[in-house]
Amino acid sequence: MKKKKYVMPVVLFIIFEAVAVTLWLTTKNIFYLFNFSYIGLALSFGVFLYTKKYKYARRITQLLVGLYMLVYLGIISRENMQIEGFWYYLFTGVFEAATIHYAVAKVFGPLIFGRGWCGYACWTAMVLDFLPYKTPQQPRKKLGWLRYATFAASFIFVAALFLAQVGNIERIMFLAFIIGNVIYYAVGIILAFAFKDNRAFCKYICPITVFLKPMSYFALFRVKCDKDKCIDCGRCKKVCPMDVDVTDNSRKRKNGTECILCFECTKECPKKAL
C-alpha cells in the first residue's frame, strides 16, 4: 500500500520525460530535453512531498516551475511565455518556445491533468497564492466574460504589430512580457483584496483559461467523491479556492473545469471520501 502512493509522482515524471525525449529527437534541440525533464522532476517532487503530507508541497513546486519560467525562460532567455508570445510564434510559423509550451501545458496537457498548470506552474498564481484570501470570502461574481476580452486583446495586439509591419518586433515582445507580467500582478493583487479571493484574477481575467477550460472538461485525472463515505458536511466546498463542487462526480459539476488539483478538499475531508 505504501508503494502505491508513489505511483503518481513516478507516472508524472515518465510522462514529462517522454515529452522531453520526443521533442528533443523531433526538433534536434537538446534544450527541450532539459526543459521538460526539469519541469517533470519539479512536479514529481512536489507530488512526492504531498504524499509525505508536507504542508508546503504545492508551493515548492510553484516556485520551482514558476520562477524557472518567469526568470530563466522569460527574463534571462528573453522569451515571451505569455499568450502574446504564443500568438507571435504562431504568426511567424515557428513551432518552438511559447508555441510548444502552450501545446503541451495548455492545450493537450489539460486532457490529462485538467488545470493542474494553474495549481503548480503558473508564475502569476505563484505570487497570488501568498496573499491572505486562500479561500473565497465572498460569493463568485459573474465576471467570467472578462477573460474573453483579455484573450481577444492579446490577439489583436500581436496581430496589429504584424499588420503594421512594426520593426524590431522581438524587442517589443520582450517588453510586452515584462510589462504584461507587471500588469497581471498588479491587477491580480488588487482583485484579490477587492473580492477577498486570491484566485479572482484566475476566475475573471486570465486569458489562458480560454484554452484550459474546454480541454479540462475531458481531464483524465480528476478529484472524485466516494458517495458511500461522504457525509455532506460541505467542508470541501468551503476550502476550494475555485468554488468547485467536488462532491458531484459528473463532468457537468459546478465549476468543474476550474479545478486546479490543489487537493485542499482532500486534506479537509474528515471521512477521506475524496
Image: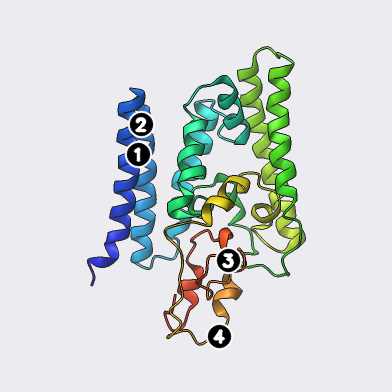
Residue closer to the observer: 108 or 21: 108
Q: Secondary structure at mark 4?
A: loop
122 w.r.t. 83: above or below: below
Q: CA distance from mark 3 to mark 2?
A: 34 Å
Q: CA distance from mark 1 to mark 3?
A: 30 Å
Q: CA distance from mark 1 to mark 4?
A: 41 Å
For the residue marked with disc 2, what is the amino acid? Leu
Residue mark closest to the camera, 3 vs 4 = 3
Query: What residue sits right under mark 3 in the picture?
Result: 252
Residue mark closest to the camera, 1 vs 3 = 3
Query: What residue sits right under mark 1 in the picture?
Result: 19
Specify the quadrant of the image occupied by residue 184: top right
The answer to which of marks 3 and 2 sits earlier in the sequence is: 2
Q: Secondary structure at mark 1?
A: helix
Residue 171's label in the rendered image is none
Q: Are marks 1 and 2 in contact (CB under 8 Å)?
A: yes
Q: Residues within 10 Å of mark 2 (few under 14, many from 20)?
A: some
Q: Are marks 3 and 2 in contact (CB under 8 Å)?
A: no
Query: What residue sits right under mark 4 in the picture?
Result: 233
For the residue marked with disc 1, what is the amino acid? Val
Whole-percent x and y of residue 88?
Answer: 60, 25
Q: Are marks 4 and 2 in contact (CB under 8 Å)?
A: no
Left or right relative to 241: residue 16: left
Q: CA distance from mark 3 to mark 4?
A: 21 Å
For the residue marked with disc 3, what is the amino acid? Lys
Query: What residue sits right under mark 2 in the picture?
Result: 23
Q: Secondary structure at mark 2?
A: helix
Specify the quadrant of the image occupied by residue 172: top right
Residue at 53% from the left image edge and 37% from the top image edge: 70
